[in-house]
Amino acid sequence: ASPRTATRGGFTITVFRTGDELARAAASRVTSGLRQKQDLMIVTATGGSPTRTYEFLAGDHQKDPALFRGLRVHKLDEWGGLDADDPGSCEAYLQEHLLAPLQIDHDRYFGFRPNPPDPVGECRRVSQWLYQNGPSDICILGLGLNGHLALNEPADFLPPFSHKAILSEESRSHPMLAIARKPATYGMGLGLAEIFASKQILLLVNGAAKAKQLRRLIEERKVYTQHPASFLWLHPNVACLCDEAAAAECDLNSLES
């Protein structure tokens, strides 16, 4: 069966039968972007949501390494207090799943340095770099179990720029941190202004665990800081790619009504 699609404003949701079909479609958007712009910059999430997409990109790189020669990668966020080689760090994840397979050299990789001596200064450095070298072309995001985007957690207010984040209980129990050598003590992540400067946002939502939050996003359609993902309604080009399990509780018809 072909994917089901619904659109409202700049937000399009596409429901694929399986997570593999979703990941293949997401990877294809990156390779299509690279064909149009050789030095494409992508902002990359970590964790379970994008892993399969990165595996497809690694396969595409094996077939056509030249296509990826100019690709630039910017890390979306990082767990504070973890060393670069900690298996739970975003750094270790990206090195394994994206940077090594796609042969992204040091000059084409940017983002938060793990465990910096001055986290606030590090966030300022990242903000400044993005302001001077951005915007990114594609920002790859997952949907948090509490509705967070990156490490923009539900709160009374949301910082617009890169910031040191207090981790919510949901973030502290993230599967990545289960394999970390020590607990993460804080987070560093791009702010919504930096995420939303991206020309396109790819929101990857897979698995039944995300069904409740996806329904909340699709059916509530209101913007508030206690639900950071809701700010996606303000962006002019969001492609939400999900599988049947994640979309099980969503009424796609309600989106267009």
Image (cartoon, grey):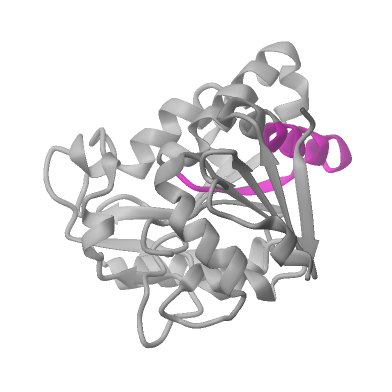
Left or right of residue 41: residue 157: left
Q: Tell me what residue is drawn at x 80 percent, y 70 percent.
A: 9
Q: Tell me what residue is drawn at x 60 percent, y 29 percent.
A: 18
Q: Tell me what residue is drawn at x 77 percent, y 26 percent.
A: 67
Q: Nearer the viewer, residue 86 or 240?
A: 240
Q: Position of residue 213 (x, y in %)?
A: 46, 59
Left or right of residue 173: residue 130: right
**86 is higher (above) or lower (below) than 134:** above
| Quarter of the rendering occupied by the C terminus | bottom right
Q: Position of residue 53 (x, y in %)?
A: 58, 31
Q: Residue furthest left?
A: 182
Q: Quadrant of residue 153?
A: bottom left
**51 is higher (above) or lower (below) than 9:** above
Q: Position of residue 176 (x, y in %)?
A: 29, 40
Q: Residue furthest bottom?
A: 156
| Quarter of the rendering occupied by the N terminus | top right
Q: Position of residue 190 (x, y in %)?
A: 48, 65
Q: Residue furthest top?
A: 63
Q: Tell me what residue is drawn at x 71 percent, y 34 percent.
A: 25
Q: Is residue 197 magenta?
A: no
Q: Which residues are magenta?
A: 25-46
Left or right of residue 91: residue 167: left
Q: Nearer the viewer, residue 22 or 256?
A: 256
Q: Nearer the viewer, residue 63 or 112?
A: 63
Q: Nearer the viewer, residue 174 or 67?
A: 174
Number of numbered tags placed on the structure image: 0
Q: Is residue 43 magenta?
A: yes
**80 is higher (above) or lower (below) than 181:** below
